[in-house]
Amino acid sequence: MNDLRAKVDTDALAEEHGDVLYRFCRSLTFSREDGEDLFQDTFLKALERPAKLTADPRGFLFATALSLWRSRKRKYARRARIAPTEPLEDQSVPAAGPEEALLAREELARVRRAAAALPERYRLPLVLYYAMEMKVNDIARTLDLPVGTVKRRLHTARALVEKGLAEDE
């Protein structure tokens, strides 16, 4: 087992997939601290199973993060719900002036609220597609779903977000 661990270049793995995996963990947890914990636990779990990293490291890392997040979510639900989490605030929106920046931030907050209100089955493919810029085939592999199901859920999620934005006005 130690021989396999030695063959995994953790620096290269973190360099290649670290940023996108971190953003994914943050988008799942809506919290910097929880996202960092999930990110670290994902890499630790991946290092426990180095053989799985050889075929599709990115897909395995995303699937592992998703699995760990779901486990934590179930655990916290059993513990009578924890305090609400904070939204992602550090992502800036480029704009020409302060008024445009404020409007763009407000619109982004509306979209995030509408997306966060979606059921998990629609929210996860949406986050993977738009925030993590994954292809539909990769999302299907990560979520262990048929490609057609992912496409349908993306379509439904877009329609639900659009409907939520229209109701918010």
Image (cartoon, rainbow, N blue to C red):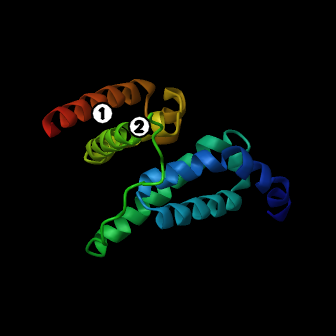
* Displayed quadrant of residue 159: top left
Which part of the image, by quadrant, shows the C terminus? top left
Q: Give the residue pinned by disc 2.
A: 125
Q: Give the residue pinned by disc 1.
A: 157
Q: Give the secondary structure at mark 1.
A: helix
* Displayed quadrant of residue 85: bottom left
The amino acid sitting under disc 2 is: Pro
Asked if marks 1 and 2 touch (Cβ < 8 Å), the reply is yes
Whichever of labels 1 and 2 marks the residue nearer the N terminus, that label is 2
Left or right: 63 in relation to 145: right
- The residue depicted at 59 percent of the width and 45 percent of the height is 20
Left or right: 44 in relation to 97: right
Q: Is residue 88 above or below residue 83?
A: above
Counting every numbered tag in the picture gives 2
The amino acid sitting under disc 1 is: Ala
Q: Residues within 10 Å of mark 1 (few under 14, many from 20)?
A: many
